[in-house]
Image (tube, helix red, strand yellow):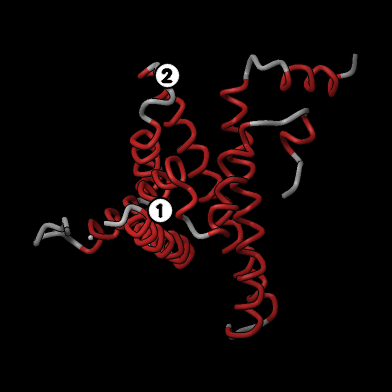
Amino acid sequence: MDILSKLDRVVTSGDYHDFLTLVKGARNGAVYGAKVRFSHALVTALLFRRGSLKRKLQMVVSATKEHAINLGTFVFIYKAILLALSKATKTPGSNKGSNAFIAGLLGGYYVFGRGGKSGVNQQIVLYVFSRVILGIAKGLVKRNSLNRFLPTNATPDAVWCLFASTCWGLVMYMFATEDDILQPSLRGSMVYLYRDSDSWDGLKTLLWHNM
């Protein structure tokens, strides 16, 4: 039996399923982030940025790399915390929403809050924020049924960290408990990142399967 066949048997055995969901989640995050950012950055650089073609391409590569790494890292952290919380409580389904919020909050703080207000990070968080607001509105309408929490002495960086982490906590909570209130394109991408990464039928679909 060759090495690929042996690896195929390992990844399909189920023995390492929890760990491999983290691997595939990080991979899906990196792939998705690269796809989304590359086309956006390329068009923006060619149409609106000044400088040489080489400089423009460097900006595209840099933005694509940052988006891919940040999203891949967030997916890995989110799924790892979710797994840890599930094992700690030993009741995977009972705390689904609160666990998703905590995992999203901590992942959002580490990757997008503590990671700084770069252009890429701001665009990602603001995109998520707009979908969170829309989701909240839809949720209120759905229930036929809106508090502010900012200390007066909060610094801009503290406010940004709170904003970034809360956005990710809320969107992960919504996705885990009531994903039909999320904007369809966001929901579709989240299904790919967090649910599709829970299953595979071999080494190829674990590492190289495309969207």
Specify the amino acid type for callout 1: Phe
Figure label count = 2
Rendered view: 50 above or below 87: below
Residue beneath the point at 16% across and 55% down: 149
Q: Residue 52 falls in which quadrant of the image?
A: bottom right
In primary-sequence order, the first of circles 1 and 2 is 2
Q: Which of the pair 129/162 is nearer the observer? A: 129
Q: Which of the pair 32/115 is nearer the observer? A: 32
Residue 28: x percent and y percent? 63, 44
Taking 123 as reference, is 56 left or right?
Answer: right
Specify the amino acid type for callout 2: Lys
Rendered view: 199 above or below 145: above
Identify the mark at residue 87; answer none if there is no mark.
Answer: 2
Q: Residue 13 falls in which quadrant of the image?
A: top right
Taking 149 as reference, is 195 left or right?
Answer: right
Identify the mark at residue 112; answer none if there is no mark.
Answer: 1
Give SS at disc 2.
helix
Residue 98: x percent and y percent? 33, 35
Q: Which of the pair 118/131 is nearer the observer? A: 131
Mark 1 or mark 2, whichever is nearer to me:
2
Q: Which of the pair 133/81 is nearer the observer? A: 133
Graded by Cα atoms within 10 Å as few (under 14), some (14 to 19) or many (20 or more), the crowding at tag 1 reads many
